[in-house]
Image: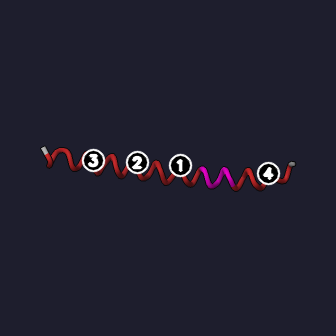
Amino acid sequence: MLRVGLPTVTDIGAVGRSILVSACELFGLGTILWVVYGGGMR
């Protein structure tokens, strides 16, 4: 049971971590773009 369960958990953790990292990167880029363009337009 554990041998089957552990790799699945680590796979989900790795996928979740990569998704979280890309989400943070996208959020950071969006914030920078909003500050540069959105803030400059006002």
- Tell me what residue is drawn at x 75 percent, y 54 percent: 35
Q: Residue 10 placed where, x, y %?
A: 29, 51
- Tell me what residue is drawn at x 40 percent, y 48 percent: 16
- Tell me what residue is drawn at x 20 percent, y 45 percent: 5
Q: Earlier in the sequence, mark 2 or mark 3?
A: 3
| Residue at the right extreme of this rendering | 42
Q: What is the distance, in whole Å, between disc 4 and disc 3 at their CAs? A: 41 Å
The residue pinned by badge 3 equals 9
The residue pinned by badge 4 equals 37
| Residue at the left extreme of this rendering | 1
Circle 2: residue type: Gly
Q: Earlier in the sequence, mark 1 or mark 3?
A: 3
Q: Earlier in the sequence, mark 1 or mark 2?
A: 2
Q: Earlier in the sequence, mark 4 or mark 3?
A: 3
Taking the image as shown, residue 3 lies to the left or right of residue 20, namely left
Taking the image as shown, residue 13 lies to the left or right of residue 21, namely left
Taking the image as shown, residue 18 lies to the left or right of residue 2, namely right
Q: Secondary structure at mark 4?
A: helix
Residue range corresponding to the magenta coloring: 27-31
Q: Earlier in the sequence, mark 4 or mark 1?
A: 1
Q: Could you say which disc has been placed on residue 23 in the image?
A: 1
State the quadrant of the N terminus.
top left
